[in-house]
Amino acid sequence: MMRWLSQWWRGGTAAVEPASMRDAARLAQLHGASFAHGWGEGEFEAMLNERNTLVHRLRLGRRTIGFAVSRIGADEAEILSIAVDEAYRGRGLSRTLLMTHLGHLAGRGVRTIFLEVEENNQPARRLYAGCGFVVVGRRERYYKQPNGEQLNALLMRRDLS
């Protein structure tokens, strides 16, 4: 009883579910708050309409607090973006989101997943490594920051089979 009450008080239990068009504005808001070059609502609407793109939202109670987006090609997929509202980071929710998203990709026949991450983004690197991703490459000066600085990207891979 106390666990249920505690979860209710904090906003409910976390759920990962397919995103829909009505989520596009919130997903754009989350992306803009998480990345230097945020995607707009129209970009999310376009991705939500693509058959080869899988978009999940992370919901806590009634509030969408995160998302994951992947593009699928044959038996491979690339995670294009994953984000969790800053107020909810550090609670293991991104791991729940990512692992559930990977399970859905596997269910669609995906055997290999790729992603890129800023080399200096230690929280994201720890998340991906903890979920079985390994570094397989590096792209020099790949991410351009608002101040003009260019940061390296690491290419990571995980096999699902």
Image (tube, rainbow, N blue to C red):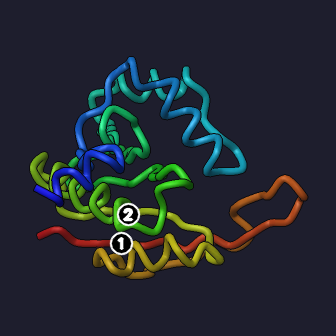
Residue at 25% across, 34% down: 18
Q: Quadrant of residue 42?
A: top right
Q: Nearer the viewer, residue 4 or 156?
A: 4
Q: Residues within 10 Å of mark 2 (few under 14, many from 20)?
A: some
In the picture, measured across the screen, residue 56 lies left or right of residue 33, that is left
Residue type beneath disc 1? Arg
Residue drawn at 9 percent across, 50 percent down: 107
- Residue at numbered disc 1: 157
Structural crowding at the residue carrying mark 1, measured as other residues with C-alpha within 10 Å and reported as few (<14), some (14–19) or many (≥20): many
Along the line of sight, the residue nearer the viewer: 97 or 116? 97
Residue farthest right in this picture:
147
**Quarter of the figure with the N terminus:** bottom left
Say which amino acid is labelled 2. Phe
Mark 2 element type: strand
Q: Nearer the viewer, residue 138 or 149?
A: 149
Earlier-in-chain disc, 2 versus 1 = 2
Q: Quadrant of the C terminus?
A: bottom left
* Residue beneath disc 2: 114
Tell me: 160 left or right of 49.
left
